[in-house]
Amino acid sequence: MLVKTYGSTLQGIDAITITIEVDVSSAGIRFHLVGLPDSAVKESQQRIEAALRSIGLTIPGKKIVINMAPADLRKEGAAYDLPIALGIAAASEQIKAPNIHKYIIMGELSLDGSIKPIKGVLPMAIQARKEGFEGFILPKQNAHEAAVVDRLKIYGVENINEVISFLSGRTDIEPTTIDTRKEFSQKQYLFDNDFSDVKGQESVKRAMEIAAAGGHNIILIGAPGAGKTMLAKRLSSILPPFTLTEALEATKIHSVAGTLARDTSLMTQRPFRSPHHTISDVALVGGGAYPQPGEISLSHNGVLFLDELPEFKRSVLEVMRQPMEERKITISRAKTTITYPSNFMLAASMNPCPCGYYNHPTKSCNCNPGAVQKYLNKISGPLLDRIDIHLEVVPVPFEKLAELKDGEKSESIRARVIAAREIQTERFKENPQIHANAQMSSRMLRTYCLLDKQGAAILKEAMNRLSLSARAYDRILRVGRTIADLDNSELVTATHIAEAVTYRSLDRESWGR
């Protein structure tokens, strides 16, 4: 007897429906599993046999052929255990499941018949709804995640016996439902870190507000203990809240990577990723034999923080250059090409020199001559060119640290950032690929970054007197445009340009000499 069940596989952050055809015949005693399964899928026979035995069923001593179509697409992982087991039980007429074809079914089986959670259920649920399936049967731990998708019944189950009872009509399972918008709005502003915790550092807070308002990449340079990491960790608390579309994109990526917390329906806060400096280039940008998203994709629509930037391997940093420009990463292998989104905001920190005290107000630098420039040279010019704001961070004096008064709350800063982003949304409404000032092309700069005479004069003087590199010109205009947006000014004035110039420390030829 031939029975078809339906599962799903992942390709990038999208899902493809898999048809699992199970044929049980009396001509022979063999178990054939075909359709390009990997080792985990091939090993399913032992798990399925034990799980079925635990509920009084068996794998029949007959010829069993299982085909997973499309046959030229590789099937990975143990999540196909449940649909294969149900297909065998139905094809051997041990159970009756007339409506089994109406559902996508996924789950990894334990030997006692219980069902373990899997990853990637959100894109699977989206694809199931798109193809008109009535429901999605999956592990109970994943039900909240899949329930984000409306117009699809989500059945969370704990063991295979529960699924068989449901498919045979003996029992009902209450579909999992959530109020996505209510849950989304309740958790949007619950941050562990707040800018009110930071004493002093008003100039740095101002720079981070500008970076958040325009989506600008930022690097903080300062001595150990100056507060660089503390400030960077609070950056996501002043970014505009997720839109539902952005939240869905980010959740899909984390679902595919398996980093989404259990019983989580939808990510409500922008991701903040802070990989260690020993990370490999594959772990950062994504890849592997079967390409998985890397840190730059896991920080999509959020912040990627690289602490102690010069300590990262140069090859690791260089592979970020293209994704930073294109806002996506394409990973090619012999049999597949996958594109992951990577629209992240880069925040980085570094010491100014190996000892950490170059330009320190009270401590002297004891590095050898040329060591400062050599240390800075660990970061390539093209990478620095993609960082809009370079800012020196000086240690906070004791008087500021001892103050009992809290600083400005993230909530207040975020309100100004949101107002500036709304101006940019209106400005770029004809360019759906552009969301913030940092993404403007050189042609757009000539349209949207109009300087008055005094502003143009100041920029020219700064380029000449401070020995700023030519590549700093566009960056200064972009940052100046954001400062003008924060001031609700249509023109980029001399005041805005003068402030933007101060945020290009590492472009000065005198730095480190």
Image (tube, rainbow, N blue to C red):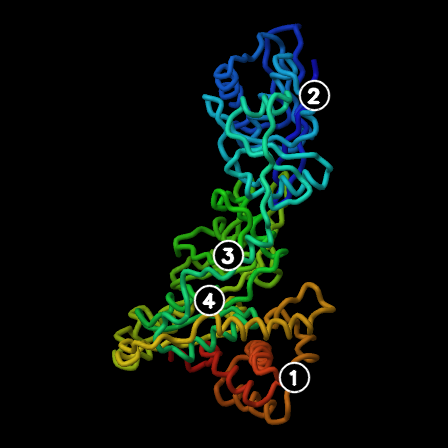
Q: Earlier in the sequence, mark 2 or mark 3?
A: 2
Q: Earlier in the sequence, mark 2 or mark 1?
A: 2
* 2 vs 1, front mark: 2
Q: Is residue 267 left or right of residue 352?
A: right
Q: Which mark is residue 478?
A: none
Say which quarter of the image contains residue 32: top right
Q: Amino acid at mark 1?
A: Glu
Q: Nearer the viewer, residue 390 or 311?
A: 390
Q: Nearer the viewer, residue 440 or 128?
A: 128
**Residue extending farthest top:** 27
State if disc 3 and disc 2 touch (CB < 8 Å).
no
Q: Position of residue 440 (x, y in %)?
A: 64, 71
Q: Earlier in the sequence, mark 4 or mark 2?
A: 2
Can you identify the residue that label 4 sits on? 235
Can you identify the residue that label 3 sits on? 187
Q: Position of residue 82 (x, y in %)?
A: 57, 26
Can you identify the residue that label 2 sits on? 98
Q: Amino acid at mark 2?
A: Pro
Can you identify the residue that label 1 sits on? 490
> CA–CA distance between discs 4 and 2?
54 Å
Q: Nearer the viewer, residue 263 or 2?
A: 263
Q: Earlier in the sequence, mark 4 or mark 1?
A: 4
> CA–CA distance between discs 3 and 1?
34 Å
* 3 vs 1, front mark: 3
Residue displayed at 59% across by 42% down: 177
Residue displayed at 56% across by 43% down: 145
Residue displayed at 50% across by 84% down: 499
Residue 420: tell me if it is visible: yes
> CA–CA distance between discs 4 and 1?
26 Å
Q: Residues within 10 Å of mark 2 (few under 14, many from 20)?
A: few
